[in-house]
Image (cartoon, helix red, strand yellow):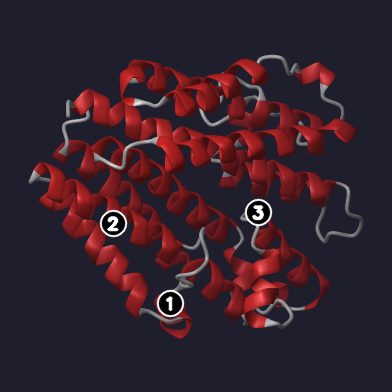
Amino acid sequence: MLGRTASNLFWMGRYMERAENVARLTEVGHRLSITPDVGSGYREDWQATLATAGCPDPKAAGLDKLNAETVQRYLFFDRKNPSSVASCLEAARTNGRSVRTALTRDVWEALNAAWIEFGAFKPNDVRPDQLPELLDWVRQKTSLFRGAVQGTLLHDGGYRFLQLGNFIERADNTARILDTRYSVLLPTTEAAGGERGMHQWETMLRSVSAHRSYRHIYKDRYRPGLVAEFLILRKEMPRSLRYSHDHVRRALVRLADITGGGEASLALAQETSTQLRTLDVPAILRLGLHEFLTDMLRQTARIADTAAADYHFN
């Protein structure tokens, strides 16, 4: 497979996953903005949402006012924001068009329809009461794309590059969510107790659609150690760091079998996957939660960059 084709499939997977992640983050911000008594105020919650979405400096992005309207417009429609839903769907479709012959009809139509139909939404037409409908639409379209990939695409090298991009992006997103709000996962902080802490833990779980599955597993109140374990180490949780990196490793194992190469990126992926299988929450807290998450973000980016070099993406 040509490096350019591999790159297109990898980034198509990343951008579709990112579009869904940004929609989930926006939904959490929306829930917080309509919930009274959320602690230190809406501005902090919207700023945390932006930071998780890769915008730590709102003023640099032209966001002088942080409110529901400006942030939602930026995260959904701003073409200058490379991580907006609009930008992600366009980039995914562009990458897909470049490898059209490697896709099934179902995958291409799911990708193309999402891009076309999103163009019908206009920022001024989406009122606050219509936002949940738009958020549901994004989740449905990305789920349709994922289902078409799983159910119709040949599980060959192209499929593995697409999966690699998908789970690299998912691991990055989960680590960013945790790192943005990591203080409420530290049992020694004041934020970890009381209504504010409970609200923040639920917010983190909702951002990865995990609040109900958390209760199913632990049958307990939200507790910082259990929330950390669930989002970092649970192998059954589809958006945990362990689950995501296990799938990154599996994709690279299969690509190494198919191509006979990729040793460097596979070695990094195996190292990260092993680390997540052998650690527990007390060990992570001893390392420092923020430091651990920062290292996870670096390792995820390093795996992606090394895979790009191994498989000649550029």
Task: Name the residue furthest left.
Answer: 260
For marks 3 and 1, the one nearer the N-term is 3
* Relative to 192, 172 lies left or right: left
Res. 72 mark: none
Closer to the observer: label 2 or label 3? 2
* Three-letter amino acid code at the position of disc 3: Ser
Q: Which residue is mark 1?
A: 284
* Relative to 184, 230 lies left or right: left
- State the image quarter where residue 132 is shown: top right
- Residue 269 place in picture, x, y as percent: 25, 58
Res. 250 mark: 2
Res. 207 mark: 3
Element marked by disc 3: helix
Mark 3 to mark 1 CA distance (whole Å)? 22 Å
The residue lying toward the viewer, choosing from 219 and 181, is: 219
The residue lying toward the viewer, choosing from 52 and 20, is: 20
Element marked by disc 2: helix
Mark 2 to mark 1 CA distance (whole Å)? 24 Å
Position of the C terminus by quadrant:
top left
Q: Residue at x 17, y 36 (%)?
A: 311
